Image (tube, helix red, strand yellow):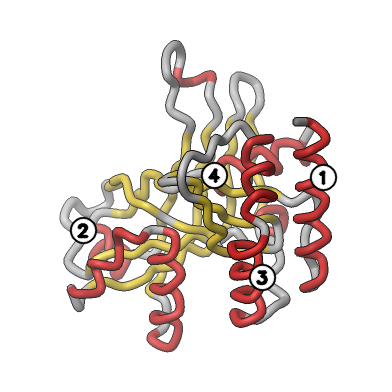
Amino acid sequence: MREQALSEAKQLVRYATSGVLSTISKNMAGYPFGSVTPFMLDSEGNAYFYISDIAQHSKNMAQDSKVSLTVFVAAAEGDQNENARATLVGDCHKVTNTKQKEMIKQFVTHFPESKSYEKAHDFAIWKLEVKRVRYIGGFGKIFWLEQNEWVGSSKPWTEEQELQVVEHMNEDHQVAMIDILNSMGVSVNNHIQMLSVHTEGCYIKADERLVFVTFRRECRAMGDIRVELVKLTKLARKSA
């Protein structure tokens, strides 16, 4: 039951592209301040934001690093409480100057519209290091997930190696990616592109929709990526 909840919580957050980031207000001392913002995750499950230094969130986090990020499935109708939600709790700090350029590049890959932020010199990447996760999968399905459960492995490959995989998939395996997405109920009309690979899955952009494809097993070596993608392709075609 707990393992299933952990898997569901990770899928929920991986599939999301935005959430409610809540910080401790500097202007209204001691009060929480929440606002919707886009985010991305690394392989370990930590979240990243691209925020202006003059934004209220940045000012708040500079004073108090304690934050939470709430992600939920919006109900099309009926009771919102019947749908899953997860809250990541932890500390958020600005990424070091040596890592800013790399992380901005990754963020822009996932959110191309954010490239315009680079023209403003006051935007920076912030990292939320997750301490604990509260997951509610519906009535009676409530868990606190601990840091050692949530945090996954860092990528055991280099950025250059990952780029080779991404380029290979985009150039030679478009049909395979479409088959995988179709098996997930995601239709592709005009454009498909793999963006990045993580130990637990990969991000693929289908038209304008960002989709996280979960691997059957965690990749602990470079060769595991091919094994998992082949496995997903075979399963997709078998179920078609």
Marks 3 and 1, the one that precedes in the sequence:
3
**Disc on the earlier residue, 3 or 2:** 2
In the picture, measured across the screen, residue 66 lies left or right of residue 215, that is left
Give me the C-alpha separation between circle 4 and circle 3. 21 Å
Amino acid type of disc 3?
A: Val
Identity of the residue drawn at 82% across and 70% down:
223
**The one of 240 and 44 positioned closer to us in this rendering:** 240
The amino acid beneath tag 4 is Tyr
Instruction: Tell me the distance, in whole angstroms, between the alpha carbons under discs 3 and 1.
Output: 19 Å
- Say which residue label 2 marks: 56
Classify mark 1: residues with Cα within 10 Å, few (<14), some (14-19) or many (20+). Answer: some
Name the mark nearer the viewer: 1 or 2. Answer: 1
Q: Position of residue 154 (x, y in %)?
A: 67, 71
Alpha carbon distance from label 4 to label 1: 22 Å
SS at circle 1: helix
Find out whether the residues at labels 4 and 3 contact each other: C-beta distance under 8 Å: no
Q: Which residue is nearer to you in this view: 22 or 50? A: 50
Residue designated by label 4:
15
Query: Label 3: few (<14), some or many (≥20) within 10 Å?
Result: some
**Where residue 234 is drawn, which disc sits there?**
1
Mark toward the start of the polypeptide (2 vs 4): 4
| Amino acid on which disc 2 is placed | Gln
Choose top left, top right, bottom left or bottom right for residue 50.
bottom left
Query: At 56% from the left edge and 53% from the top edge, which residue is drawn?
Result: 204
Is tag 4's residue or tag 1's residue first in the polypeptide sequence?
A: 4
Q: Nearer the viewer, mark 2 or mark 4?
A: 4
Q: Determine which residue is flagged by label 3.
A: 165
